[in-house]
Image: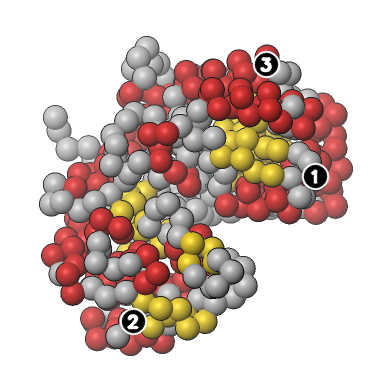
Amino acid sequence: MKTIIEPFKIKSVEPIRFTTKEERINILEEAGFNPFLIKADDVLIDLLTDSGTSAMSSMQWAGIMQGDESYAGSRSFYRFEAMVKKITGLKYVIPTHQGRAAEKILFSITGGKGKFIPNNTHFDTTRANIEYTNAEAVDLLNETGKHPEIRADFKGNMDIEKLESFIKETGPENIPLVMMTVTNNSGGGQPVSMQNIREAKAVCVKYNLPFFLDACRFAENAYFIKMREPGYRDKPLLEIAQEMFSYCDGMTMSAKKDALVNIGGFLAMNDSTLAMNCRNLLIVTEGFPTYGGLAGRDLEAIAQGLEEVLDEHYLEYRIRSIEYLGEKILAEGVPIIEPPGGHAIYLDAKRFLPHVPQEQFPGQSIVCELYTEGGIRSVEIGSVMFGKKDANGKLIPPPMELVRLAIPRRVYTQSHIDYVVEIILEVFKNRKNIKGYEITYEAPMLRHFTAKFRPVK
Ligand SMILES: *Cc1c(COP(=O)(O)O)cnc(C)c1O
């Protein structure tokens, strides 16, 4: 097989700034050993997130100039709306400034005390927006999805039996809707199969419940279906995406992922009453329904991005570049969530640093080493982010200690990824000397963003 190459050439470049290891040691110490507090200019390869970090195409930039900034009835809105309808088939399309704004509107209307929203795994903003209304967010991920070392095709799938028994126990009248996140971001970017979507829908039909997709990475999910699920190999990606959406009654979306833009989001649905309620709330919190917190130019760029993201060559390159990074480090024994997901590689910090106890944040140690060694910024997804405390202040760790290396779309080339491989292997080779950390400052909520650390003596 020939090398899968980047399916684009580069017209505009942005220099990245090199620093010495000594400089990075100082920068990291000044940032309290928390890479969220490092200036982006001091980062060489930034793998903090794939959200809003995509490179736009020349056509998208041209769209920025074409944007119609009319307050109401903008031409750019109609182009955006037509594109979303073409892919999703949903009747009512409502733009918002980000994915979480779509969630906020949807759950302000459907949530509330005594309500339950099942999902394969709720993303953190989705969970937060549900809990903010005093409703409960329930994760019903299938069992294999919870084991990093088990290789399976669709580790993002929902446990359909659990879904049905949950609906029976809770009572369908207490469940305003069922959600499914594609791909499953919080579970390692793992895909959901068409069969699983179909089965979840069938259960929803049986109990007369609306079925919603959290569709941030719908195109990456469609590509996995094409490659892994029988019967889809010869189907165009647009048709696969259309089939995925044909089973849903509505969706939320962060355009900062698979719409290949730096800001934006939307929600869409078939229920006219729900759409009317959403639009009424949208006017209070986001703006008039034909711009919803975005400029006309943003809507133009989203429409163009949605057109580009379903390109076969783009998705082949996209999924392959993640897999390539995963394969290279796996071959040298580096423990990761297997198989690689659609947007990121997750290092398994427990197996990477077995000598560092969870109380000393092994994930944070790896994050710090990757920065010091190579100027690479990653993020801990473990006890720093999700750790809770018991009555004595002792850590209650989450099930997994992970380090996420999220790959921005169309931003880095293969040589950047080769460099990332070299740095990870260098850190892995020296792993016995890596020490843990302790927290010196933490905020009462979402502490990972602002916490400060020091190395354990
Ligand atoms: C990013 C993301 C969101 C939230 O979108 P924002 O644009 O960051 O507000 C919701 N769900 C999933 C699965 C996401 O990845």
Give 154 or 378, whichever is nearer the viewer: 154
Which dot marks residue 148?
A: none
Disc 2 C-beta below 8 A from ligand 1:
no
Count neighbours of disc 1 (C-alpha within 10 A) and say few if under 14, some if 14 to 19, many if 20 or more.
some
Residue shown at the point (66%, 20%) measured from the top left: 204
Q: Let me know if residue 287 appears in the view.
A: yes
Question: Mark 2 and mark 3 in contact (Cβ < 8 Å)?
Answer: no
Disc 1 C-beta below 8 A from ligand 1:
no
Give 59 or 212, whichever is nearer the viewer: 212
Residue shown at the point (71%, 18%) measured from the top left: 207
First-in-chain label (2 vs 1): 1
Count neighbours of disc 3 (C-alpha within 10 A) and say few if under 14, some if 14 to 19, many if 20 or more.
few
Q: CA distance from mark 2 to mark 1?
A: 43 Å
Q: Quadrant of residue 170?
A: top right
Q: Position of residue 381 (x, y in %)?
A: 43, 58
Q: Which residue is mark 1?
A: 112
Q: Quadrant of the C terminus?
A: bottom left
Q: Which residue is mark 3?
A: 205
Q: Which residue is mark 2?
A: 455
Residue shown at the point (37%, 56%) measured from the top left: 402
Q: Position of residue 303 (x, y in %)?
A: 58, 38
Question: Relative to 315, is 11 above or below?
Answer: below
What residue type is disc 2 on?
Pro
Disc 3 C-beta below 8 A from ligand 1:
no
Residue shown at the point (49%, 62%) measured from the top left: 396
